[in-house]
Amino acid sequence: MANIMIREKPAGGLVFYLPKRDMEADIRSIEFDTPEKWGGELKLENGGVYYVDPIPKPGRLPVSVSARRLVAAED
C-alpha cells in the first residue's frame, strides 16, 4: 500500500498525488462519495485505478490516506 494525498482543485474536482513516484492525476470517479462513506475505487485520468478503504468523508482536504494500486497507469 502506498501513502497518497487527495486534494481539491480550485475549479472543482479532486486530484490524486503519489509522492513516491511524483505522480499527479485528476480523479475521474470515486466509488463512494457520501458523508458516511468516502473512498473505494478511484479511477484516474491516466487510466490508473487505486483502492482506498472507505472512511467517513473528511471535513477538509487535502487528506493523506493509504491506497492500493489495482490497475497501473498508462505511461
Image (cartoon, rainbow, N blue to C red):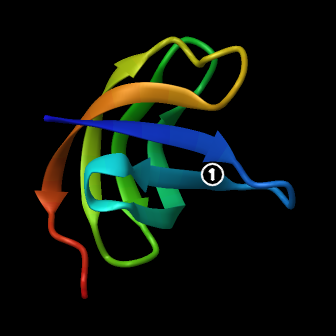
Task: Judge from the rendering whether residue 63 lies leftward or rightward of residue 59; answer left or right.
Answer: left
Q: Quadrant of the N terminus?
A: top left
**Residue bearing the label numbered 1:** 14
Tell me which residue sits at (63%, 32%) in the image.
62
What residue is rendered at 47% in x and 63% in y? 24
Residue 41 position, x and y percent, is 32, 46
The image quadrant of residue 52 is top left
Instruction: Name the residue type under label 1.
Output: Leu
Q: Quadrant of the C terminus?
A: bottom left
| x and y percentages locating residue 11 in the rendered image | 86, 61
Instruction: Give the tally of numbered discs.
Output: 1
Does residue 20 appear left or right of residue 7 in this picture? left
In this rendering, the answer to whether 18 lies above or below 57 is below
Instruction: Please say if 18 is above or below 72.
Output: above
Q: Quadrant of residue 7?
A: top right
* 29 left or right, relative to 52: right
Q: Position of residue 43 (x, y in %)?
A: 38, 61
Query: Measuring 85% from the left and 54% from the top, which residue is drawn there?
Result: 10
| The furthest residue to the right | 11
